[in-house]
Image: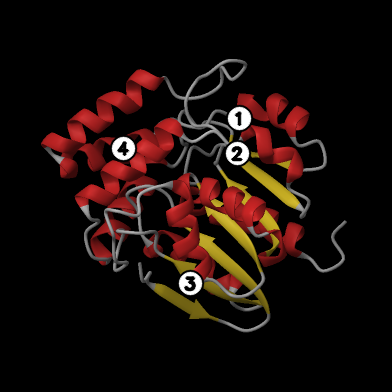
Amino acid sequence: MRLFVETTGDGSELVLLHGWGMNAAVWSPVVAELSQAFRVTVIELPGHGASAYDPAASTLDDWVTACLAAAPERAVWIGWSLGGQLAQRAALRDPQRISGLVMVTASPRFVVGDGWPHAMALATLTQFARALRRDHHQTLERFLYLQVQGDEAARETLRLLRQDIALRPEADPLALEHGLELLRTVDLRAGLGDIRCPTLWLFGERDTLVPADLCDELERLMPAAEILILQGCAHAPFLSHPRQCLRALNHFLEPDHA
């Protein structure tokens, strides 16, 4: 699968991976500033935006392989939501390619499970999958509402999400279906302790999709990682609170940052 890639700026390499149903345009509030100090590569996930999709390559590793093929040889990967799971898996599979990880409202497991209470109910994602087959446009719209729910800038963030989706080609419905299946089934908890690169987890205080309450579990699974909760934010902090998000990113990306 050939993925759409957009690169801007000069300096150390950054890779940005968006979330399910979204596209490269969602990063626009932060790319301009990041590209002043870094070479920023924005990758659209398989079947999203202008990226091609191969229905026979639907596993997490298939998607990770496509992202690795499109990414610089070595970079800090910043992954939002589903993009965060792809970045986690890339760091486990090809650690020499990943110099650092930033997980933006991401999780190693998106649904509730044994010892993992702070996540989405399995029934919620199952209902999304059923609705997606009937009307993927309406399902995406509902997902946008969930992403901004609780955010102190919810109305403006929803407007930006809608605007960004419209700027790029429409996602492949089968890629959307397979992406939901990844969110429903992927569980990367067992491998977190094997990730050795510097890692930052960014959570939204008001996120209802990836609750910040899972911080305690992450501290146990990945004690060396940094964890920061962004106040007033829901699931898309780089859109709703770009300055707050950029401060956290720039601090983590400083060359002398311990």
Q: Are marks 3 and 1 in contact (CB under 8 Å)?
A: no
Colour mapping used in the image? secondary structure
Q: Could you tell which of marks 4 and 1 lies nearer the N-terminus? A: 4
Q: Please say whether residue 228 is visible from this viewpoint.
A: no
Which mark lies nearer to you, 2 or 3?
3
Q: CA distance from mark 2 to mark 3?
A: 27 Å
Relative height, residue 31 to residue 174 (above, below): below
Element at badge 4?
A: helix
Q: CA distance from mark 2 to mark 1?
A: 6 Å
Badge 1 amino acid: Ala
Q: Which mark is drawn over residue 118?
A: none
Q: CA distance from mark 3 to mark 1?
A: 31 Å
The quarter of the image holding the C terminus is bottom right
Element at badge 1?
A: helix
Residue at 17%, 39% in the rendered image: 138
Q: Could you tell which of marks 2 and 4 lies nearer the N-terminus? A: 4
Q: Residues within 10 Å of mark 4 (few under 14, many from 20)?
A: some
Q: Nearer the viewer, residue 68 or 176?
A: 68
Task: From the viewer's perspective, tell me whether residue 50 is left or right of residue 19.
Answer: left
Residue 247 pos. (x, y %) = 68, 57
Residue at 30%, 63% in the rendered image: 49
Q: Are marks 2 and 3 in contact (CB under 8 Å)?
A: no
Badge 4 amino acid: Phe
Q: Which mark is drawn over residue 203?
A: 2
The residue wearing badge 1 is: 212
Q: CA distance from mark 2 to mark 4?
A: 18 Å
